[in-house]
Amino acid sequence: MANEAIILKGKDPSLILTSGATGRISALFSLQALRSLVMFLNGVVLLILLPFRVLVSPAAKDEHDGHRKGAVVRVPATIVAWKSSSNSGSASSRRTMAIKRVLEEEKEDESSGTVRDYWLFRTRRGDTIFTQSWIPVSVKIRGVVLLMHGLNEHSGRYGEFAKQLNANGYKVYGMDWVGHGGSDGLHGYVHSLDDAVSDMKAFLEKILTENPGLPCFCFGHSTGAAITLKALLDPKIEARVAGVVLTSPAVGVEPSHPILLVVAPIASALVPTYQCNSAYKKGLPVSRDPEAVIAKYSDPLVCTGPLRVRTGYEILRITTYLQQNLSKVKVPFFVLHGTADSVTDPAASQRLYEEAASSDKSIKLYEGFLHDLLFEPEKDAIMQEIIQWLNSRV
């Protein structure tokens, strides 16, 4: 692939005014003016990040709102080890932690029939991307699965799911996209989700080359599902993938006012890494299992800081693109969504199901379930439904 330069295994590479304007300049940089500028920028950020609404058809709105009201889960802030993204460490320290986890799990999994490994590859942009694998050794290999995690998390969170897939004969690969987990970038910052799409294509090419003749499937969660869908809109990629599983896909977000479509790219260019403290609700309930929520927000490889302006704009941009191209989706897919999800919208998943051109498509809506389906109390049953879908296509 054009965007992949070097692949490394088991090794961390070196990372690489004018005269006469004095009065006007003094006024511009007065304390009051600076305060006004900060207030203005913060207002712009709030306009961009907070008014995002999900796409819900008028007919479904009342029912959809009812689902959400009926599944409120509150997690006391005192039991969540909340962190600021500024304390999340550099990319190199996060990568060291991600590698250490793989090596520790490799020792633990020696008797379980799963072999753990990791790779680092350099993109043409100069970023180092962290990837890992779960390979079964005691069962016949039937296929491969590429995992794409959601916003602010990392591929290592899906180890339990990966081992379930291993037990059913699937090699599993995970990629931390840029700004996440063990990959390069400011934690939680995404300058362009198109970079993540390109990196996924490059990694997928590596997987396909290493596993000739085996059917290849993709799994994407939330924003990772959006990245996966955009990659699969490329006919060359779609032709080489046997199917895709999407949980809580981010395909239905738009600003509450059309003017923000003009303001958002300007703000993202001027203050791309600016963080809006009001953009997130700390301890946002993404699972009905309190222990799963605590584990997520206590994980140092999970970014829990405020959303950055550029990241928010990139989510808006990719979801807008997907909304305009749902009818071009041709790959076989299985979409799963909780009806009480407060992060992404199940109605948008229904729209994907209805508008996609795929001849092989399925949808499952879980009444009252939240965003992180594979971390809900019923996760084992959900994993088995996914595995059954995969098995029927091998």
Image (tube, helix red, strand yellow):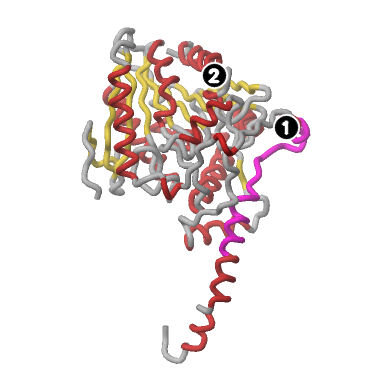
Q: Residue at position x 61%, y 26% from top?
A: 288
Q: Which mark is residue 64?
A: 1
- First reached walking from the N terminus: tag 1 or tag 2: 1
Q: Residue at position x 37%, y 45% from top?
A: 89
Dot 2, crowdedness within 10 Å: few (<14), some or many (≥20)?
some
- The residue where tag 2 is placed is 379
Give the side of residue 43 with respect to residue 188, left or right: right
- Position of residue 296 measured from the top left corner of the image (x, y, whole percent): 49, 32
**Main SS type for the magenta part?**
helix
The label nearer to you, 1 versus 2, is 2
The C terminus sits in image quarter? top left
Residue 248 visible somewhere in the drawing = yes
Callout 2 amino acid: Lys
Name the residue nearer the viewer: 361 or 160. Answer: 160
- Position of residue 259 measured from the top left corner of the image (x, y, whole percent): 64, 58
In the image, is residue 91 above or below residue 20? Answer: above
Residue 3 visible somewhere in the drawing = no
Name the residue nearer the viewer: 5 or 380. Answer: 380
Secondary structure beneath label 2 = helix
Callout 1 amino acid: His
Magenta segment boundaries in residue numbering: 41-63
